[in-house]
Image (cartoon, grey):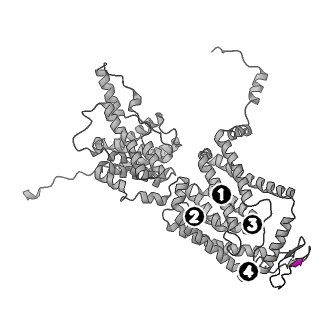
């Protein structure tokens, strides 16, 4: 074959190789994309707002009643404080270098008041330059931590990185929890563990446990930084938070939240005592009381999560297994109406739900979500059930209609279903199943009928394929893709005269390949390996449902005996 064009010189080849972008260049271009750049800018503003709310320009007051200092606490400046015991109200004066508390002895409440007065005196003597320097240090430290979390989200959850509203809500909630912890931390409450647990458990339930532990760790670091506490206190916060989060893989009952909090409370008690051992090598009654208090706050956080679960779902736009089980209750009004007006569609939906759940579980997706989505995916057929074959008993309403009109009636159940779902205030993920379960597939039966009529009568208008396609959108999650395939193969399998295992397998493979080639799974994120796993699961379910029956020999009737 003759070469087209002159070959490149060595210099041109070197220049082309050198022009290949490095990983850092590609990353820089990604960060400059409009949604990512906006998220970064907003994150910087939120970190700055947190630093202002927590007065990051001043060091926090680090002492609490019962703390045991490792060294003598000396006054850093001259200061005075009111003498409440004196009649003439003569203030008590302290000089720089004067001992305020002795090492190795727990701080009493009156010593805390003296140390607080000394702390205020130190803050008054700080210059603007020192304050700005500390503010900048805290700001940069938090920005680095948030940036590391952003890199994780960008790499592991790119969908979340592009959803500015949810991402910024997540970051604002994290910084809000850290700010709230600062206000509930002073004596005698010491309740900073509550905002941390509420935030981390919310993220674990709404998004993912790994992300909850990462962001929870950043919030714990911010809390310790704002309170001026030591490493043992940070370890207690991290340990209790991680103990609670790792138990939140599947939450199908509200009582699970209480169980989680009880286990985390045991961890809080033990870690608090261990932290005191690290600080002072002994345990006194005050340390035991503080450990009990931390355990009680942990249980209280569990009860708060129990009450805040539904608002959290609405805030993050997610569905927990608890809400899904409530939606799967067959006494739900829409499901009861579907059973009453379209019993064939109801039975079809129940069977598709069981098939979709098993297939979704096989690929690690949320099987319960797929099952509940299947229950509601055809609720639009409630309005005109007689136009769907599973609800017909003899008469076919489409025989006297033009194919285009029949197609409009068939496709209308998607829009009608979405409208009904919104009317009954179903969650958005369920509405997504209704709108996506047909994608942009072709209504093949009526398209072929229209094509035959046009070939028989060329005077008729030309048949446009777009007229016979659903409006979409295509499935955008793996669960929606599984539902689309389960819905199609179950309906097609009903039409088989002899549903033998080999015919069922051939049918499922054929339908899956057709939808794959039609591009229906392009936006769902499902892989070819996962698609094959889904096919195998659906084949197994269909064979179990449509297996052959034993033909019993004819028996004599009762009247002939």
User: Sequence-wise, which precedes: disc 3 or disc 4?
Assistant: 3
Disc 4 and disc 2: Cα gap in Å?
30 Å
User: Sequence-wise, which precedes: disc 1 or disc 4?
Assistant: 1
Q: In this rendering, which labeled residue sits more in front, label 1 or label 4?
A: 1
Residue displayed at 47% across by 59% down: 323
Q: In this rendering, which labeled residue sits more in front, label 2 or label 3?
A: 3
**Residue 174 numbered tag:** 1
Residue 527, compared with residue 318, is above or below; it is above
Disc 1 and disc 2: Cα gap in Å?
20 Å
Q: What segment is highlighted magenta in the picture?
A: 81-95
User: Sequence-wise, which precedes: disc 4 or disc 2?
Assistant: 2
Residue 74 figure quarter: bottom right
Residue named by callout 2: 247
Residue named by callout 3: 227
Residue 234, compared with residue 23, is above or below; it is below
Residue 15, how many percent across, how many down? Answer: 77, 26
Disc 2 and disc 3: Cα gap in Å?
28 Å
Label 2 sits on a secondary structure element that is loop
Q: Mark 4, residues whose alpha carbon is within 10 Å: few (<14), some, or many (≥20)?
A: some
Disc 3 and disc 1: Cα gap in Å?
16 Å
Would residue 25 be found to the left or right of residue 543 on screen? right
Label 4 sits on a secondary structure element that is loop
Disc 1 and disc 4: Cα gap in Å?
33 Å
**Residue 283 numbered tag:** 4
Dividing the image into 4 quarters, which one contains the C terminus?
bottom left
Dividing the image into 4 quarters, which one contains the N terminus?
top right
User: Sequence-wise, which precedes: disc 3 or disc 1?
Assistant: 1
> Do tag 1 and tag 4 residues touch (Cβ < 8 Å)?
no
Residue 189, compared with residue 52, is above or below; it is below
């Amino acid at each position: 074959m003759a070469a087209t064009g002159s070959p490149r010189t060595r210099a041109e080849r070197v220049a082309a190789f050198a022009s290949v972008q490095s990983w850092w260049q590609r990353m820089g271009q990604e960060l400059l994309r409009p949604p990512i750049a906006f998220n970064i800018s907003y994150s910087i503003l939120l970190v700055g707002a947190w630093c202002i709310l927590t007065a990051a320009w001043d060091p926090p007051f680090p002492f609490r009643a019962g703390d045991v200092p490792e060294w003598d606490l000396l006054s850093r400046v001259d200061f005075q404080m009111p003498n409440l015991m004196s009649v003439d109200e003569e203030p008590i004066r302290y000089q720089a270098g004067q001992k305020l508390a002795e090492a190795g002895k727990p701080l009493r409440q009156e010593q805390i008041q003296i140390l607080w007065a000394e702390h205020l005196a130190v803050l008054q003597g700080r210059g603007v330059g020192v304050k700005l320097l500390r503010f900048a240090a805290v700001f940069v430290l938090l920005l680095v931590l948030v940036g590391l979390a952003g890199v994780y989200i960008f790499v592991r959850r790119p969908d979340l990185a592009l959803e500015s509203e949810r991402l910024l809500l997540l970051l604002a909630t994290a910084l809000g929890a850290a700010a709230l912890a600062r206000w509930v931390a002073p004596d005698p409450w010491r309740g900073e563990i509550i905002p941390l647990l509420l935030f981390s458990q919310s993220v674990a339930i709404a998004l993912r446990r790994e992300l909850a532990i990462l962001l929870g760790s950043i919030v714990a670091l911010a809390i310790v930084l704002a309170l001026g506490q030591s490493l043992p206190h940070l370890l207690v916060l991290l340990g209790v938070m991680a103990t609670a989060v790792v138990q939140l893989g599947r939450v199908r009952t509200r009582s699970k939240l209480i169980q989680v909090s009880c286990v985390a409370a045991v961890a809080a008690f033990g870690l608090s005592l261990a932290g005191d051992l690290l600080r002072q090598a002994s345990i006194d009654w005050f340390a035991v009381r503080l450990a009990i208090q931390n355990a009680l706050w942990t249980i209280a956080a569990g009860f708060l999560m129990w009450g805040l679960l539904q608002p959290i779902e609405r805030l993050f736009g997610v569905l927990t297994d608890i809400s899904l089980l409530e939606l799967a209750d067959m006494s739900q009004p829409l499901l009861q109406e579907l059973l009453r007006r379209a019993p064939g569609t109801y039975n079809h939906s129940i069977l598709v739900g069981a098939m979709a759940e098993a297939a979704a579980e096989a690929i690690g997706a949320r099987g319960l979500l797929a099952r509940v989505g299947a229950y509601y995916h055809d609720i639009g057929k409630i309005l005109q059930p007689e136009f769907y074959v599973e609800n017909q008993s003899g008469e076919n309403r489409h025989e006297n209609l033009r194919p285009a009109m029949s197609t409009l009636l068939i496709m209308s159940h998607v829009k009608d279903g979405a409208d009904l779902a919104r009317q009954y205030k179903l969650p958005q993920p369920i509405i997504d199943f209704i709108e996506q379960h047909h994608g942009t597939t072709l209504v093949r039966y009526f398209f072929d009928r229209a094509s035959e009529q046009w070939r028989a009568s060329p005077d008729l208008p030309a048949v446009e394929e777009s007229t016979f396609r659903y409006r979409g959108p295509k499935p955008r999650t793996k669960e929606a893709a599984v539902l689309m395939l389960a819905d199609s193969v179950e309906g097609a399998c009903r039409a088989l005269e002899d549903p033998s295992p080999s015919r069922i397998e051939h049918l499922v493979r054929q339908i899956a390949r057709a939808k794959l080639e039609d591009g229906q799974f392009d936006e769902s994120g499902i892989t070819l390996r996962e698609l094959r796993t889904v096919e195998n699961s659906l084949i197994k379910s269909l064979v179990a449902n449509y297996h052959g029956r034993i033909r019993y020999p004819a028996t004599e009737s009762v009247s002939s005996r």
